[in-house]
Amino acid sequence: MEAVYDGYISKYINRKASEPIARFLTRTRLTPNQVSWGAFGIAVLSFVSFILGQNIIGGILAQLSSIVDGVDGSLARLKGMSSAFGGFLDSLLDRYADILIVLGLTLWSLSNEIYPGIWLAGFLAITGTICVSYSRSRIDAKHRHLFDKGLKSLASRDIRLFLIMLGGIAGQAYFCLIAIAILTNLVVFYRLIYMYRFLRQETDRSRAIPASGEVVLKRP
């Protein structure tokens, strides 16, 4: 089973709440998959809050969804209920939740802000959000850890939802969408260039190593 990656916000903020919650839930009959659905439900409430004009509540619920999303993995580990389907379900629900939350923020901006290109900012934020997750899932497992550090990890889900919380509370959805759009798409582009160079170097090294049993003749 692949190790769980924690972004900067998850590691230093979210886990402070999600771990105690997970330990408490071990005393209940709640399953990790049910918690995954709960995190998705909170994301839906965030979307509804934004379209109803409640930007502060929408932002807080987006961050709460991020925190609860960390509970299912911890609960699965503590209860010994980790499964391939659970990881698949969690990842799938996260993508729907991401789209709903960013869409909700975009709709709030359209109703309450007068900046140009709001739809474009929202579209690029959603596109970048999906491509950040997709680029990590599509790289083979042995190289996936390369996206979990440095600049390649700066658009992780916990960071995006934390920015949405800040943008929602501050009532600055437009600039939040632009920040997410720029950050996510730049990270995807950087990952593309990085992996192109990394895999090309790896291929060159493998070609330079002689096959097993092959005799390499050197000139005196």
Image: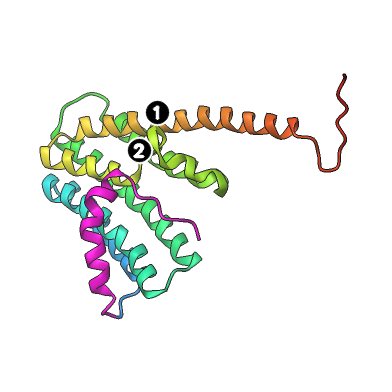
x then y, percent, for residue 49: 17, 51
Residue that carries the numbered disc 1 in the rendered image: 186
Image color mode? rainbow
x then y, percent, for residue 136: 48, 43
Q: Earlier in the sequence, mark 1 or mark 2?
A: 2
Residue 102 seen anywhere in this rendered image of the structure: no
Residue that carries the numbered disc 2 in the rendered image: 155
Drawn side of residue 99 relative to residue 105, left or right: right
Drawn side of residue 208 relative to residue 113, left or right: right
Residue segment shown in magenta: 1-28
Specify few, some or many for label 2: CA neighbours under 10 Å numbering under 14, 14-19, or 20 or more.
many
Q: Are marks 1 and 2 in contact (CB under 8 Å)?
A: yes
Q: Amino acid at mark 1?
A: Leu
Specify few, some or many for label 1: CA neighbours under 10 Å numbering under 14, 14-19, or 20 or more.
some
x then y, percent, for residue 74: 34, 64
The residue tagged with tag 2: helix, strand or loop? loop
Q: Nearer the viewer, residue 34 or 2?
A: 2
Q: Nearer the viewer, residue 164 or 197?
A: 197
